[in-house]
Image (tube, grey):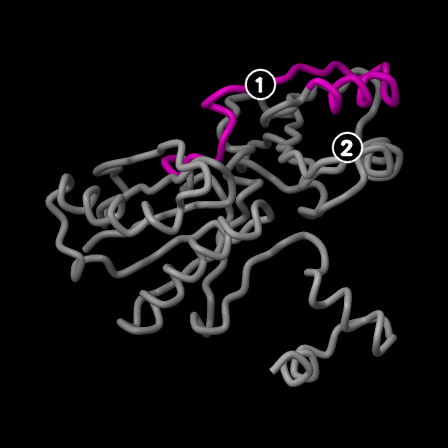
Amino acid sequence: MAKLALDTATEALSVTVIDDADRVLGHTSLAAGRQHGERLVPVVAQLLEDCNVDRQAVDSLYVGVGPGSYTGVRIGVTLAKTWADSLGLALYQMSSLALLAAQASLPVGDYIIPLMDARRLSAYTALYQQTDQGLMAVTADCHADWQTWLSSEARQHLQAGAQVLMIGQNLAPFAEAFSQALPDVSLKTLEGWTAYPHTDKFQQVAHERVAEPALLEPVYGHLTLAEQEWLAKEGGASVDHAALIHYYS
């Protein structure tokens, strides 16, 4: 039997196959741009073929559920939950930001800020720390105004002298704002192809079994446009999703 992990939350499309002894049989990460929908299924099929693994031998799926690109995340989640639901496979969800953080190899005690640029100096981000037990989430994944996140979450958890690695793409403006807000914290950055969520590290990331695969939804880090419009019309503090579906159907 085999396990398959996939993530499509960024421009990178990443798929990994491991055997029942947790050995990596094969891994593919490629720059898919906006072509995740066209390329995901052929990439999965080719990797399984290259690994000599029949599709029927896959008994567990692990999928990055975001946050990240709306369209990208939906494509990966839709494939995974449809596959799992139709064949009765075990399905596990994991954070795409945690997968990104897992690309960093750091000493115990150091912090990692995985970051996906969400425009206008906002980001999908969180704070992680390398511990003796592995990668630990210090704050929850979120979509946030960067300056606000720095003054609240980052300042609350990062003391003077802390060692921090920020990992992602187009980090210059975020790193500059970080250094201005927390000048006593040591910051390094990592960009380039390594700084994407690659699923060959998925075993280092916390994952949660999905009880009802058909009901799995992406994690966007904030309300979708439809949810925002519904709240503006109906008011209240939270979205009634049953009413929202009825409203748009």
Q: Is residue 243 left or right of residue 6?
A: right
Residue for point 40% across, 46% down: 36
Distance from the alpha carbon under mark 1 to that under mark 2: 18 Å
Mark number, residue 88: none
Q: Nearer the viewer, mark 1 or mark 2?
A: 2
Q: Position of residue 218 (x, y in %)?
A: 55, 59
Mark number, residue 190: 1
Q: Residues within 10 Å of mark 2 (few under 14, many from 20)?
A: few
Residue for point 71% across, 38% down: 123
Q: Position of residue 156 (x, y in %)?
A: 85, 35
The amino acid type of the residue labelled 1 equals Leu
> Looking at the image, is 7 positioned above or below residue 226?
above
Q: Is residue 104 left or right of residue 177?
A: left
Q: Earlier in the sequence, mark 1 or mark 2?
A: 2
**Image: magenta residue range:** 172-200
Which residue was labeled with disc 2?
Answer: 121
Q: Position of residue 84 (x, y in %)?
A: 34, 67
Q: Is residue 100 left or right of residue 118?
A: left
Residue for point 71% across, 36% down: 119
The amino acid type of the residue labelled 2 equals Leu
Which quarter of the picture shows residue 118?
A: top right
Classify the position of the C terminus by image quarter.
bottom right
Determine the residue located farthest toward the left in the rendered image.
52
Classify the position of the N terminus by image quarter.
bottom left
